[in-house]
């Protein structure tokens, strides 16, 4: 392990809430649901630490923290539907707002 900075904010696991709760978005191995805290370090000495508000997923393999909703084992039905396709001007072939009745680029009626 190399250190490139003498100071900075690190994240570290405080407590494992659920082991193997999801998959790592980076390497695909098992990730744990954890409570973590942020630690401000100065010259490798922790000078300040504060708990994070929400639990996060943590991968032991690549030391990655990521939000639980990124985990692939969760159903993704809470995602909003994709925006409707933008209208395309048939004269100049540019995307225009669907509520426009005239193309702002070439002035053609849509
Ligand atoms: Zn990983
Ligand atoms: Zn046009």
Image (spheres, rainbow, N blue to C red):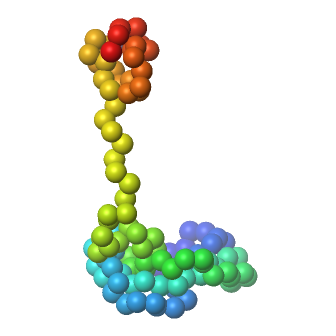
Residue 12: horizontal and vertical position, in percent? 54, 82
Give the number of callouts: 0
- The quarter of the image holding the C terminus is top left
**Above-or-below relation of 74 to 86:** below
The reply to whether residue 89 is in sight is yes
The part of the image, by quadrant, that contains residue 90 is top left
Residue 50: horizontal and vertical position, in percent? 67, 81
The reply, left or right, for residue 92 in relation to residue 48 is left
Residue occupying image coordinates x 46% and y 90% = 17
**Above-or-below relation of 95 to 10:** above
Tell which of 108 and 62 is nearer to you. 108
Tell which of 104 and 33 is nearer to you. 104
Residue occupying image coordinates x 64% and y 70% = 8
Residue 85: horizontal and vertical position, in percent? 31, 35
Q: Residue furthest top?
A: 107
The reply to whether residue 63 is in sight is no
The reply, left or right, for residue 43 in relation to residue 18 is right
Residue occupying image coordinates x 39% and y 84% = 32
Residue occupying image coordinates x 32% and y 63% = 77
The part of the image, by quadrant, that contains residue 72 is bottom left
The reply, left or right, for residue 94 in relation to residue 36 is left
Q: Residue furthest right?
A: 47
Residue 10: horizontal and vertical position, in percent? 58, 75
The part of the image, by quadrant, that contains residue 4 is bottom right
């Amino acid at each position: 392990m190399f250190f490139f900075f003498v100071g900075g904010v690190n994240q570290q696991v405080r407590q494992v809430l659920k082991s193997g709760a999801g998959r790592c978005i980076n390497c695909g191995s098992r990730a744990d649901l954890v409570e973590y805290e942020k630690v401000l370090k100065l010259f490798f000495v922790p000078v300040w630490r504060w708990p994070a508000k929400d639990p996060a997923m943590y991968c032991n393999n690549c030391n990655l923290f990521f939000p639980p909703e990124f985990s692939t084992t969760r159903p993704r039905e809470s995602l909003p539907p994709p925006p409707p396709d933008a209208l395309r001007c048939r004269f100049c072939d540019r995307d225009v707002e669907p509520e426009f009745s005239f193309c702002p680029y070439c002035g053609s009626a849509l």
